[in-house]
């Protein structure tokens, strides 16, 4: 029950923040373009909190249904415009002004993602280098020649710096050609090229949770090998050396760096016996662990690093370029995925509804601020891309209407707009149906 409440709370916060950003884009540019704003609402339905402010007596509302929001401009299509407000209605402003207002919502979503990634890059993001775990016999990966312990260096010529970018590149290559060219470095240190060929099976492999199982390998876990030593730390004081492989702690077997972190964190300030493998010989070290405090709890600390883990961190200026690159890459990939879903190259099961998004929101919030901020950035990008789709009820569809009016010199006929709205409603209902179907399919298997 607690997990469900966390999911709901994280989801409501995410939607409220991102909708507020989106609608503030419309609001701000509308004001700059001389339009009169009647209402700025976060949420739909009955207003719960209302504040009237400014010379235009704009209503600022928080409404009952926290699943959206809107900005209401003065509009002659909804009623007569008073003499003192002539020229300030949405329809009275030049077409380029109206298009700018419609573009501003998605633009602010992309700006939010840039800001979120900037914060992440400045703070530093713990990152795992992509490597190959166990490989299934007679699988696509085995046929290509992948082996356990291979470190993935590039995918299709793009640097594989972390698993997130690596997965994006694998999917992009796979749905484009059915082939995934990789540069890898084996456990023996030798580099080689391999190509995973999935042929016509690419669309199936894009279904959620299928990728690695379908390719025939699992992501590798970093081994419990000492890659660096903290000066004056517990490991250095006990005589541990770079290259030592940790085998066990107080008799508890350690098979990966994740195991090591789990065992050590449970023993703050305790004296333990650590068994290490060094130069093909086993040694036992008497180690007095240190401790660190986080979120009001104390955790054991050994003072070692691992070469498979590194912190991706930039200075404030360099982080601007990195966040722009990241936002552009994620936007292009999201748009490409939507396009490929339409033509059938990518499974429509990737469309997530509110239940799945709430679960992702709760999971990311539980893992910490960095994970939640990354989740918000991804959802903000998706919101921006979706709103630019040429569907009449969305910003993209309205931009198409305004562009047609700009070209022909007069608005579309009322009949054409009604037909467009009907098509838009059908398209959105279809999209929502797929999203809810996928949600329930994931829940009930």
Image (cartoon, grey):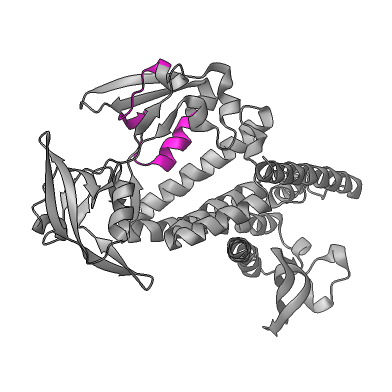
The one nearer the camera, 182 or 157, is 182
- For this view, does 285 lie left or right of residue 268? left
Query: For the point 24% across and 28% down, which residue is it?
Result: 187
Please say whether residue 161 is one of the residues in the magenta stretch: yes
Report the front residue among 88 and 66: 66
Determine the image quadrant of residue 143: top left
In this picture, which residue range is highlighted in magenta?
A: 143-172
Q: Residue 129: x and y, percent?
A: 32, 40
Compared with residue 300, is residue 129 higher up or lower down, i.e. above or below? above
In front: 16, or 21?
16
Please provide percent x and percent y for residue 164: 43, 42
Q: Residue furthest front?
A: 251
Residue 138 vertical position relative to residue 70 in the rendered view, above or below: above
Residue 180 pos. (x, y %): 44, 24
Q: Is residue 178 left or right of residue 315?
A: right
| Residue in view at x 37 percent, y 50 percent | 322
Visible residue check, residue 171? no
Q: Residue furthest right?
A: 415
248 horizontally vs 81: left or right: left
Residue 252, position as x, y percentages in the image: 28, 49
Residue 175 visible: yes
The residue at the point 74 percent across, 78 percent down is 48
Q: Is residue 393 magenta?
A: no
* Residue located 61% across and 66% down the image: 9
> Which of the two residues, 431 or 103, is positioned nearer the viewer here?
431
């Amino acid at each position: 029950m607690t997990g469900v409440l966390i999911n709901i709370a994280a989801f409501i916060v995410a939607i409220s923040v991102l909708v507020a950003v989106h609608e503030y884009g419309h609001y701000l540019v509308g004001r700059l373009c001389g339009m009169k704003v009647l209402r700025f609402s976060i949420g739909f339905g009955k207003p719960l909190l209302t504040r009237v402010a400014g010379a235009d007596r704009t209503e600022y509302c928080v409404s009952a249904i926290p699943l959206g929001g809107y900005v209401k401009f003065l509009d002659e299509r909804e009623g007569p415009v008073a003499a003192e407000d002539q020229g300030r209605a949405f329809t009275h402003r030049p077409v380029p002004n109206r298009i700018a207002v419609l573009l501003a919502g998605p633009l602010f979503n992309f700006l939010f993602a840039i800001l979120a990634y900037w914060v992440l890059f400045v703070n530093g993001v713990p990152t795992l280098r992509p490597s190959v775990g166990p490989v299934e016999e007679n699988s696509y990966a085995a046929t290509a020649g992948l082996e356990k312990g291979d470190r993935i260096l590039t995918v299709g010529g793009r640097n594989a710096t972390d698993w997130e970018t690596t997965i994006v590149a694998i999917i992009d290559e796979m749905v484009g050609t059915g082939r995934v060219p990789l540069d890898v470095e084996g456990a023996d240190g030798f580099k080689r090229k391999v190509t995973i060929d999935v042929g016509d099976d690419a669309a199936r492999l894009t279904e959620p949770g299928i990728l690695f199982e379908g390719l025939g390998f699992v992501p590798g876990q970093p081994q419990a090998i000492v890659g660096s030593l903290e000066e004056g730390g517990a490991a250095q004081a006990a005589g541990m050396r770079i290259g030592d492989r940790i085998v066990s702690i107080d008799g508890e077997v350690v098979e990966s760096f994740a195991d090591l972190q789990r065992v050590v964190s449970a023993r703050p300030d305790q004296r333990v016996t650590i068994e290490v493998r060094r130069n093909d010989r086993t040694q036992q070290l008497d180690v007095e662990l240190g401790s660190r405090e986080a979120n009001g709890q104390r955790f054991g600390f050994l003072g070692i690093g691992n070469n498979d883990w590194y912190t991706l961190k930039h200075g404030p200026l360099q982080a601007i370029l990195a966040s722009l690159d990241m936002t552009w890459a994620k936007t292009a990939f999201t748009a490409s995925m939507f396009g490929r879903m339409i033509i059938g190259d990518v499974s429509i099961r990737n469309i997530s509804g509110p239940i799945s998004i709430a679960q992702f929101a709760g999971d990311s919030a539980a893992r910490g601020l960095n994970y939640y901020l990354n989740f918000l950035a991804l959802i903000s990008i998706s919101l921006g891309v979706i709103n630019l789709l040429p569907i009449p009820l969305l910003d993209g569809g309205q931009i198409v209407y305004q562009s047609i009016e700009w070209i022909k010199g007069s608005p579309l006929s009322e009949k054409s707009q009604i037909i467009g709205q009907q098509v838009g409603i059908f398209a959105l209902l279809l999209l929502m149906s797929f999203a809810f179907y996928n949600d329930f399919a994931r829940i009930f298997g």
